[in-house]
Image: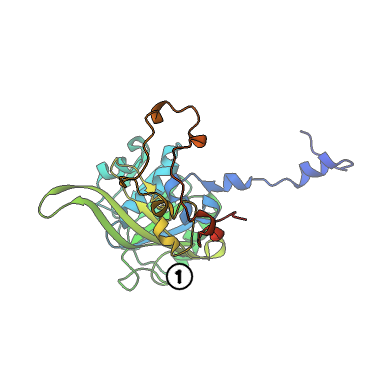
Amino acid sequence: MAAVSNPTSLPDVAHLTRPIVLARDQTVPMLAGLAGLVPEGGLQRGSTVVVEGGPGATSLALALAAGPSAAGGWVAVVGRPDLGLAAAVEAGIAPERLALVAEPPRDQWAAVVAALVGAVDVVLAGPHRVGAADARRLAARARERGTVLVQIVPRSGQGSSQGSGRGAGLEVDLRLTVTGAEWQGLGQGHGHLRARKVTVEATGRRRAARTRQAELWLPDGHGRILAVAREPARLGSLGSRSYAGADVDRLVDPTSPDLPRCPDLADCPDLADCPDLPVCPDLAVCPDLAELPGAS
């Protein structure tokens, strides 16, 4: 469409004022199980993320990179010789679009990471202390190029970056902390590790300022990364409040010898009108009947 120098209609104005990048294009794809940890279910391009905690932190970082990788993006890992390639593939990262970079010299770490920013979609890096100037430059370059920086660090207080990370690590937009982990499948001296349930707390700044918490299968029994489904409320949790059917066990005792038995019950065409069904003699004055929802 040719440039409009003197807009005279609403479509012309809309063309001139439309954003260069749509909001949905400013986020990277994420696995559905992780959507509850970030605002609006999407991780902002150019974000700097710190994943901290004990067991489960590395798996969570790999899961963050799995979404962009599955969508065709490239992932680079810097300075994590302990990271297993099999673990990355099981998390969902495509091995043909995964670059492994050896640990650079301490004084060249920021330069190596900066070179990867803009060349790949996600950079995973281990714990490393950088100066305030390098932290600002890396954060600015990531925002400009749209690369997501993910740094895996120990739990806060054990050498991880704090606040904005000045003098310690990268400037942090989103911090994911694994606060608990529990394996499933082991018994008393028997069984196999089948699934791991972790609790993750998300904090940050700007859009991610509100604290969020989620439970994840990392992985579940089938190797998938999913949010833990919340169990529905049990009837016992309703307390003493009456509900439909609450007194049915007191109205009719199915083991009573006095309960009339209809010989044609299996073939009854209209069970509701059967004259042989028992009727509670106190139904008219039942003290709980008035409290039933919708009772008049």
Q: Residue furthest left?
A: 189
Kind of element beneath mark 1: helix
Identify the residue position indicated by label 1 in the image: 132
Say above or below: 146 vs 129.
above
Residue found at x 58% / y 44%: 25
Towards the viewer: 86 or 191: 191
* Vertical placement of residue 92 versus 213, above or below: above
Residue type at the position of mark 1: Ala
x 54%, y 60%: residue: 291
For disc 1, the neighbor class at 10 Å (few under 14, some 14 to 19, many from 20) is some
Residue 135: x, y in percent? Answer: 45, 65
Q: Nearer the viewer, residue 265 or 9?
A: 265
Give residue 122's position: percent from left, percent from top: 43, 48
Q: Write down the quadrant of residue 106 in the picture.
A: bottom left
Quadrant hosting residue 182? bottom left
Do we see residue 180 in this rendering? yes
Q: Give the colour scheme of this rendering.
A: rainbow
Residue depicted at 54% across the width and 48% down the height? 27
Q: Position of residue 208 (x, y in %)?
A: 52, 62
Residue 51 x, y percent position in the rendering: 37, 59
Residue 111 seen in the figure: no
